[in-house]
Image (cartoon, rainbow, N blue to C red):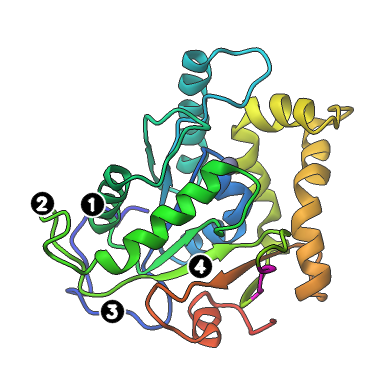
Amino acid sequence: MSERNTPDPSGGRKRTDSFDRILFVGAHPDDAEFHAGGLMVSQARRGSRIGIFCLTDGSAGHQALDRVSLARRRATEAAQAAELIGAELEIWPVPDGELEPSLGNRLRLIEAIRAFAPDLLLTHRLNDYHPDHRATAQLVQDACYLLRVPNVAPGTPALRRDPVVLAAADFFTRPAPFRADVVLGTDSVIEPVLDMLSCHASQVFEWLPFISDTPLKGDPRQWLREFYGARPKALARRHAPDFTYAEAFEVSEYGHRMAASEIQQRLGVPLMA
Ligand SMILES: [Zn+2]
């Protein structure tokens, strides 16, 4: 991503065949990789600038490490994963498990999103098992319209246009099940996604085997392929049967309105949903 800190060569003109700046706003270090690793890898390869925001420090998820040690380790892991695709990374010093959709966090997120100026923003859905995921989704939803309102967080210039906002797939059904508006087959990028996930060793090789009661046996890479792969395989079976692995996203009504077919086109993938 050699161009990411240089002036925009287009002179500010919008490309219409891709998304130039893609931002995943997640609750924890590793959420972006788990929910949109394939999208991030594929779009980084197409020249998009990728950003990853983690709104908490990830300091809760371990059976042996204390918060300070774990936060430090996870920051290193997340930086290594981001480096693999040249992504910019921001981790908030909010304790894992304690994120609130507060006014202060809303204003801070508005400023951070404005600074990155994404044309595509990815996040969690509002109904999700983890309170930090729900709070993140709420904060993004609350920020969306206000990104363009100059008198809100006036220290940073308001955006001229909202980003397209997509929520990553989940399997929760209440109050509404996930709707697969945008679907990407990710078979061709599964290995680099596993590379990114493997950077999060404190999670994928330590915490997740422990908390999910799925002991790590044999080759760790193969264990991860099966553990991680269950979700993208299920999504492929439902929404992209020509693929083994897929990611899917629901279009938010609160971002810039764009037809799912055009979003698919800009991501460089055929319409599957
Ligand atoms: Zn998470």
- Image check: 68 left or right of 199? left
- For numbered disc 3, what is the local secondary structure? loop
Q: Give the range drawn in magenta.
A: 176-180
- For numbered disc 1, what is the local secondary structure? helix
| Residue where numbered disc 2 is placed | 155
What is the distance, in whole Å, between disc 4 and disc 1 at their CAs?
Answer: 19 Å
Q: Position of residue 229 (x, y in %)?
A: 78, 51
Q: Position of residue 81 (x, y in %)?
A: 52, 39
Mark 4 C-beta closer than 8 Å to ligand 1: no
Could you tell which of marks 2 and 3 lies nearer the N-terminus?
3
What is the distance, in whole Å, between disc 3 and disc 1 at their CAs?
Answer: 22 Å
- On residue 166, the disc is 4
Image-quarter location of ligand 1:
top right
Mark 3 C-beta closer than 8 Å to ligand 1: no
Label 3 amino acid?
Lys
What is the distance, in whole Å, between disc 4 and disc 3 at their CAs?
Answer: 19 Å
| Residue where numbered disc 1 is placed | 111
Check residue 5 for magenta coloring: no
Residue count near mark 4 (Cα–Cα under 10 Å), binned few <14, some 14–19, many ≥20: many
Q: Is residue 48 above or below residue 101?
A: below
What is the distance, in whole Å, between disc 2 and disc 1 at their CAs?
Answer: 8 Å
